[in-house]
Image (spheres, helix red, strand yellow):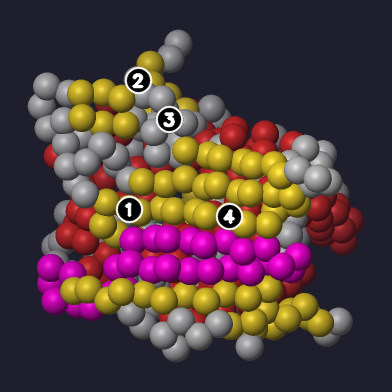
Amino acid sequence: MSAPFQTLVVGGGMITADLILPSLYHLQRRGVLGEITICALGSGPLRALSDNVDIREAFPRSSFVAQPALATAPEKNHPDLFPSLIAAMPPRQLVVVAVPDQMHYSVVMQALHGNQHVLCVKPLVLKYAQALEIEREAQARGLFVGVEYHKRFDRRALVARRDYRLGRFGELVMGDAKLIEPYYYRHSNFQNWFLTANTDPFTYIGCHYVDLVYFITGLRPSEVSLAGVKRRFPNGNEGYLWSSGRVRWENGALLTVTNGLGYPDLAAGSNDQGLIMFCEGEGKTGMIRHDDHYRGVAYSYLDARGPGGSHYNYVSPDFFRLVPWAGEGLKPVGYGYDSIEAIVEAAALVEKAGADLPEKQALAARRAAAAEIDAMGIVATPANSSINELVVEAARMSILADGRPSRILYEPSGARVE
Ligand SMILES: NC(=O)c1ccc[n+]([C@@H]2O[C@H](COP(=O)([O-])OP(=O)(O)OC[C@H]3O[C@@H](n4cnc5c(N)ncnc54)[C@H](O)[C@@H]3O)[C@@H](O)[C@H]2O)c1
């Protein structure tokens, strides 16, 4: 392993609190990461992260550098702080991108221009051409970009990928995926950016299951239609808060994708999700069914401590939990943590490939290491996951045209959406 990465997280919202920061703290505890800085728009979210009781209990000795500083007035915004923080980093460290979807492109490109490896939450970007640009820029500099599609690390997805590729189900013909996030999300900072012009539930979370079907089958999507239902957030802003999508795949198969911000707060949750895939073989059919909602654990609490204030809950021990371990505090477990760990370790592997080599050989060695990770197809990279950008681009075009289908064409000159 090369020297521990100095890490800058841009974005201090929900995903940083729920997944990224605890995962990074554990990697820091393991010696993989060095100092961690978190930059948010203002000090408010950083104060909330620093005071987060679950994180403090799990990592009693860990801390991050807040940018802007915690003492700064919380109502003051600092939208232009992160570029100077990237510019001040030593080269070839790590930038974690956890800002709203429509900002990913600009932050990722600034990180690459600043010679930093990148971990970006999904979706990487909203345009296919941007994903290609990111891929080229990273390759030119021998840097690694990993996209945090954590469902790829769910053990059930890994089992299904292997079995599907061994021909044990036949070929996908019809599927149905669903991911409905809780109603209470409508009260969060989402009100300020989850607007009709920026994103929609399919782009936000439907992409997880589209990526998963691609991850399991290797099939490429060829057509997307997406219709949405507009609703107002509590602050009056309008967003698509429900969406219904249909993806056709290159073999003619169809996948419907239902998404929304509306799972009842008081229902056993925190959300509702799952995937069913029907496949055809010779003279019989096969099936993959993942119940990603009820994973076999149900708790009824004395108080209303469930997400959304519920008592009775379906608890997923699979995605992300902080659990007792043979060490101080608590340790993160689950495919959310596995995914972050895999991306950070991939970046470290690429970095290490060039360590102690003259510049030209180091670049070649790092490119070769990154290409190997691309080809393996487990950790999502711009090269092996940009079907998602094609789908998101097609989906945004479709939803803004009231569900008119958009086609994805794979031509010798490259792929494009029309
Ligand atoms: N399941 C998943 O993989 C998953 C889940 C949730 C969110 N996400 C993704 O994570 C991203 C962030 O989502 P979230 O839920 O944390 O949103 P959020 O609204 O809770 O947080 C966004 C953060 O970005 C910060 N920010 C905005 N502009 C900034 C700027 N100019 N400089 C620095 N910081 C800035 C805000 O201060 C805030 O802390 C989105 O792209 C979302 O799609 C992924």
SS at mark 2? loop
Q: CA distance from mark 1 to mark 2?
A: 29 Å
Residue drawn at x 46%, y 82% is 403
Closer to the camera, 253 or 156?
253
Residue drawn at x 27%, y 65% is 190
- Is residue 62 shown to the viewer in this render? yes
CB within 8 Å, label 2 to label 3? no
* Lower sequence index among marks 4 and 1: 4
* Lower sequence index among marks 4 and 2: 4
Q: CA distance from mark 2 to mark 3?
A: 26 Å
Please name the amino acid that badge 3 sits on.
Arg
Please name the amino acid that badge 2 sits on.
Gly
**Residue 136 % position (x, y):** 73, 72
Residue drawn at x 22%, y 41% is 267
Numbered circle sitting on residue 329: 2
Residue drawn at x 41%, y 85% is 402
Q: CA distance from mark 3 to mark 4?
A: 20 Å
Q: Is 144 located above or below residue 6 in the figure?
A: below
Which residue bears the numbered disc 1?
181
Q: Ligand 1, what quadrant?
A: bottom left
